[in-house]
Amino acid sequence: MKYCLLLPLALAACAPATSTRNADAAAPTRHIRTAGTVAVEANTLDRHHWQLESATDRSGGRIDALFARADKPLQLDFTNGRLGVANACNRLGGSYTIERGRLDLGHMMQTMMACADPKLMALDGAIRERLEGHPRIDLQDAGDTPRLTLRTDAGDTLVFAGRPTAAMRYGSEGETVFLEVAARKKPCSHPLIRDMQCLQVRERHYDANGLASGTPGEWHPLYQDIEGYTHEDGIRSVLRVKRYAVKHPPADAPSSAYVLDMVVESERAEP
């Protein structure tokens, strides 16, 4: 069985986007004014992944619908004026601005995957409803773990913990590349790891319309993991990843790091 995301959408996400309230709105808001009087730089949001830490309703009860994935919390990503939602059933996203202390989203788009778990399917609507309801926004940037709080008019309070993005950790925006990952690992030689098994990868290229272009690169072993990607034996995938240069890597460590951005295509290979 083969699962594909809309590749033009994947490619479009590689380009800078403007923050708009609608298609004709102007430049992105550069500051967020919190519930207090201190203005916080908007790029503070860009520097972190915001993972849902707690969610309570007006009476203080936990909103279980927002925790359908025990393994991965809902995650918000603010990049170049766009808000993306990860770890639901589908990926959701849209342009945003901050107006008078409220999050104002434009029309949100989403992928169209179906999930077998009804609770996971419902998760898309549960987070979308709260984000599109113009929640009040509050950012506490003190300490090692900043926190972003959204409060809806219905009385829901969502608290997200900030985790540094790869760009922040590696000190650059990185390079976007597409890697095809073969269905099965193969033995590879490593001076420090006995009986090592490596992913087999090759670079892929696409035009602006999302169509394959050029000739794929040569297959070669990847002597490292792709951060955020878990390989399943027998599944061939095409990944959109960010490649970062690692400054001053330890001896025998790779000079580049790969971080998963999106699974563009996935299918089970024939035995």
Image (cartoon, rainbow, N blue to C red):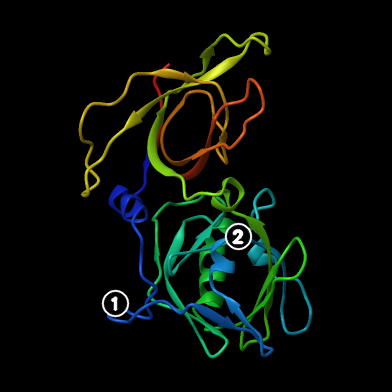
Q: Between tags 1 and 2, which lies in front?
A: 2
Residue lying at 65% horizontally and 51% vertically, measured from the top left: 72
What residue did someone put label 2 on?
A: 48
When the figure is inspected, residue 181 is found, relative to residue 61, above or below; the finding is above
Measured as percent of width and height from the top left, residue 118 is found at 56, 57
Q: Nearer the viewer, residue 64 or 40?
A: 40
- Residue 264 visible in the current orientation: no
Residue lying at 64% horizontally and 84% vertically, measured from the top left: 34
When the figure is inspected, residue 158 is found, relative to residue 256, above or below; the finding is below
Q: Nearer the viewer, residue 216 or 233?
A: 216
| Amino acid type assigned to the residue bearing label 2 in the image | His
Q: Closer to the N terminus: mark 1 or mark 2? A: 1
**Side of 175 where 73 appears, left or right:** right
The N terminus sits in image quarter: top left
Spatial distance from mark 1 to mark 2, Cα to Cα?
Answer: 26 Å
Q: Nearer the viewer, residue 262 or 97?
A: 97
Residue lying at 49% horizontally and 19% vertically, measured from the top left: 184
What residue did someone put label 1 on?
A: 23
Q: Nearer the viewer, residue 166 or 159?
A: 166
| Amino acid type assigned to the residue bearing label 1 in the image | Ala
Residue lying at 33% horizontally and 81% vertically, measured from the top left: 26
Q: Decide: few, some or many residues near mark 1? Use Cα within 10 Å; few <14, some 14-19, many ≥20.
A: few
> Judging from the image, what secondary structure is the residue with disc 1 in?
loop
- Residue 189 visible in the current orientation: yes
Q: Decide: few, some or many residues near mark 2? Use Cα within 10 Å; few <14, some 14-19, many ≥20.
A: many
